[in-house]
Structures are given as C-alpha cells and as structure tokens.
Amino acid sequence: MNTSNQVRLWAAQRLSAMVLGICVIVHLITIIYAVRSGLSADQILARTQGNVAWFAFYGIFVIAVSIHGPIGLRSVLSEWLGWRGRSADIFLLVLAVVLAWLGFRAVWGVYA
C-alpha cells in the first residue's frame, strides 16, 4: 500500500477515535441517567422512537465504529498474522460493511 493511503487510514482512524470518545461518553452518561432514573426499556424506547437527534447520534456512532474497528484490525492482522494485501483489504471492507449494516439495523430498531 502506498504512503498516501497509509496516511489516509491513519487519519481516518484517529478522527474516528475522537468521535468514538465523545460518543462513548454521551452513551455512558445516558445509560447512567436512565438507570438512576429507574427508566424501563419501554420508557427508554418511548423517548428514542422518532427522535431524529438520537437517530443521528447513534448513526454517527455506527459510522465511527465501522471505520475505526476494521482499520485497527488491519494492523493486528498485518503484525500478528502477516496478512496483508488485497485479500486482507477485501476482508476488512466486508467487515466494515457488515458492522455498518448491523449497526444501522439496531439504530433503526431504536428509532422506528
């Protein structure tokens, strides 16, 4: 892989890490609030269903995970298993698509 692609992947992983950091903090604060308020699953879903802000937030969360995870796994596969090249890139692209698909299914389930 050429240097410019490596720089792009490095930047994408760092940017997605920053987004994930914020998303995880907001998600944990939300969980703590819900638990301390004694909210049931039905009450939580009543607050999230149809809420565009929560849909957008969790959509961004899913996109960040779908970018960050496969890029990190790419390094692990390369260093530990020596798996590099086109086959590894295709596998990781498929993984990113699967993560995004599953994540957006979950987001849609909470929103719809």
Image: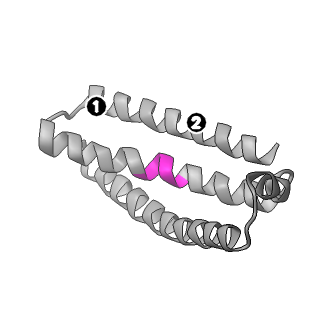
* Amino acid type of the residue tagged 1 in the rendering: Ala
| Residue 109 rendering spot, x and y as whole percentages | 73, 40
Find out whether residue 112 is within the magenta segment.
no
**Judging from the image, what secondary structure is the residue with disc 1 in?**
helix
Q: Residue furthest top?
A: 87
Image position of 46 with respect to 101: above or below:
below
Majority secondary structure of magenta residues:
helix
Look at the image and tell me in which quarter the C terminus lies: top right
Q: What residue does disc 2 label?
A: 102
In front: label 2 or label 1: 2
For disc 2, the neighbor class at 10 Å (few under 14, some 14 to 19, many from 20) is few
According to the image, what is the colour scheme of the structure? Answer: one colour
Residue drawn at point x = 14 percent, y = 45 percent: 79
Residue under the image location 58 percent in, 36 percent down = 102
Quadrant of the rendered image containing residue 43: bottom right
82 vs 58, nearest the viewer: 58
Q: Residue at x 56, y 50 (%)?
A: 63
Residue interval drawn in magenta: 64-68
Where, quadrant-wise, is the N terminus in this rendering?
top left
- Number of the label disc, if any, that sits on residue 54: none
Q: Is residue 99 left or right of residue 8?
A: right
Residue that numbered label 1 is attached to: 88
> What amino acid is at disc 2?
Leu
Q: Could you say where residue 4 lies in the image, as x and y percent from the top left?
A: 31, 53
